[in-house]
Image: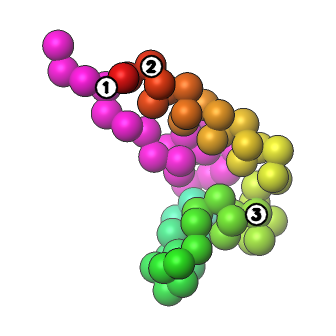
Amino acid sequence: MDPVPHRLLGQILTDGGYVTLVQLNEARRRQMMETERRMGEILIEMGYLSPDALARALAVQSSEDRGRG
């Protein structure tokens, strides 16, 4: 059986309805210019995501990662 691929934070955020694909792509463009910054931090700064929503999405990602191991 093939392992389930790791979902990136952006995919969890869009799948969960936290941000739109347009918002995510705008943040990705900014991240390309500011490579030392994390996606969640950028989305919060842009006003697209709350810290609580980021924490929920990161918890989903963490639980998925634990389930794969």
Gap between marks 3 and 2, in whole Å? Answer: 28 Å
Q: Is residue 62 left or right of residue 18?
A: left
Looking at this rendering, what residue extends furthest in the top direction? 1
Q: Is residue 5 magenta?
A: yes
The answer to whether marks 2 and 1 mark residues whose Cβ atoms lie closer than 8 Å is yes
Q: Quadrant of the C terminus?
A: top left
The image shows residue 48, relative to residue 15, as above or below, that is below
Badge nearest the viewer, 2 or 1: 2
In the image, the segment drawn in magenta is 1-21
**Is disc 2 placed on a helix, strand or loop?**
helix
Question: Taking 46 as reference, is 14 left or right?
Answer: left
SS category of the residue bearing label 1: loop
**Depicted 23 relative to depicted 62: above or below:** below
- The residue beneath circle 2 is 67
Residue type for callout 2: Gly
Badge 1 crowding class, 10 Å Cα cut-off, few under 14, some 14 to 19, many 20 or more, is few
Residue at (53% x, 51% y) in the render: 10
Which mark identifies residue 44? 3
Q: Residue at x 37, y 23 (%)?
A: 68
The label on residue 57 is none
User: Which quarter of the image is occupied by the N terminus?
Assistant: top left
**What amino acid does circle 1 point to?**
Val
To which residue does mark 1 refer?
Answer: 4
Residue at point 48%, 79% (across, down): 35
Residue 63 location, x and y as percent?
55, 26
Q: Residue furthest bottom?
A: 33
**Type of the residue with mark 3:** Ile
- Lateral position of residue 35 relative to residue 46, left or right: left
Across and down, in percent, residue 14 comes to 58, 44
